[in-house]
Image: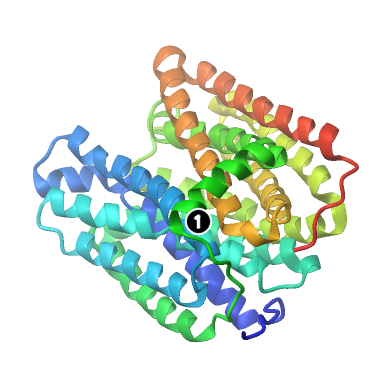
Amino acid sequence: MQETSDISQNKKLLWLMALACGLTAGANYFCQPLINSIQHAFGVTTAQAQLTVTFAQMSYAFGLLLIVPLGDIVNKTRFIPLLMALAGVGLLICATSVNLTMLWIGTVITGLFSVAAQVLIPFATMTVRPEKIGEVVGFLMSGLLVGILLSTSLSGLLSQLVHWKLIYVVSAVLIFILAFKLKSELPYAMRIRMKYSDVFKSMAELLVSEKRLSIRAYAGAGAFASMSVIFSTIAVYLSSAPFHLQDMWIGLVSLVGVFGALSSQFVGKYADRGYGTLFTFLGCGFLILSWVIFYFSSAGLGLYLIGFATTNLGLAFVHSCNQNIIFRIRPNAKSRLNAIYMTLYFGGAATGSAIGTYAWNHGGWVYTCMAGLALAIFATFFALLDYLLYRNKKPNVA
């Protein structure tokens, strides 16, 4: 069997992997700023157009549950490019759609297979030395988070300047090129022999037996839920008094979060050195602080931008430290661990969006800030619980 190489010094490959993470993850968010364009293009209601976002998130959730766990039992060198290519097919269907149903089909295919990034990240941890896991995961997470943040901004911008379908065309071409390049660049990584049905039995066993996985997942879910309160209210808040921003400018606000996303590699490097708990608490602190800043943001857009940057920084800190820890729990089950973690993580995002919408509709910005703060405190509680239970536990080597 071919020996797995250490890719931590292969900058070219790491950049290709980071671009792949950003592009595949971001592809699931292209439709969010395009609702009005979709509505007018196909002559449908706003509610029907908004279902595109719902289908994107639901298909991604199914991909996390059904496809990501396969990363432990298949040849990932071939599997990852295949997932990317299938996501590219979905994007092409969106780009050539002539009605809403066709757009929905393309969106579901894209969402289902855009989980390639969630197979790629645990794969990367299997191809580096243990002391480099956090740094490499952080670098790939920076690519993923930047991709998500840029996706809505670029999608809205290209829609305004050229056509709403252009983002699908460009991203499909890029994803096919990256898939082709990675097919020849990715090294072989060990896999285990297991039936597909047994994968899910083992996931249930992992969820029950590995308490730290659950605790860290709830901390991540709370952090992402807190962030998602912002995502669900940013348009209605910034388009109303005193800001009155247009859609394009609202989309560009998310670019402020790029600086937080880029911190993931820095956090991962220090998590490798044993500072994961410290940076987790710093992340929770940033999340709590951001909601204090948000509360006073009606005084000026600058305060909102500072709050947005701070909450992105907090989420990046918590998430990077979480993944650094969970990938060490069971080195031979990294894809399954990631599937469980990311399912709960995105479940937190969906919950946060629902809570944010409810809070805004029933109490405006004050209730929204209270909800976001409560979710940040929820994340902090589980971070504290993890510290109390595992402060003396040495991490497993991968």
User: What residue is drawn where x is 45% and y is 77%?
Assistant: 78
Question: Would residue 119 appear left or right of 246 to someone viewing this image?
Answer: right
Residue 49: percent from the left, percent from the top? 21, 40
Judge whether 112 appears above or below 300 on screen. below
Q: Which residue is mark 1?
A: 69
User: What residue is drawn where x is 69% and y is 50%?
Assistant: 326
Tell me where residue 128 sits by quadrant: bottom right
Q: Under tag 1, what secondary structure?
A: helix
Q: Considering depth in this image, is 354 or 287 the residue closer to the camera? A: 354
Tell me where residue 216 sits by quadrant: top right
| Residue sitting farthest toward the top | 362
- Which of the colour schemes (rainbow, by chain, secondary structure, one colour) is used? rainbow
Judge whether 121 appears above or below 38 on screen. below
Tell me where residue 131 sits by quadrant: bottom right
Residue 33: percent from the left, percent from the top? 33, 46
Judge whether 169 appears above or below 259 on screen. below
Q: Considering depth in this image, is 168 or 199 the residue closer to the camera? A: 199
Judge whether 374 appears above or below 379 on screen. above
The number of callouts visible is: 1
User: What residue is drawn where x is 66% and y is 26%?
Assistant: 378
Q: Disc 1 marks which amino acid?
A: Pro
* Circle 1 crowding by C-alpha within 10 Å: few under 14, some 14–19, many from 20: many
Whether residue 309 is visible here, answered yes or no, is: no
Question: Would residue 342 appear left or right of 107 to someone viewing this image?
Answer: right
User: What residue is drawn where x is 53% and y is 76%?
Assistant: 16
Residue 77: percent from the left, percent from the top? 50, 77
Q: Considering depth in this image, is 85 or 50 the residue closer to the camera? A: 85
Whether residue 234 is visible here, answered yes or no, is: yes
Residue 204: percent from the left, percent from the top? 55, 41
- For the C terminus, give its image quadrant: bottom right
- For the N terminus, give its image quadrant: bottom right
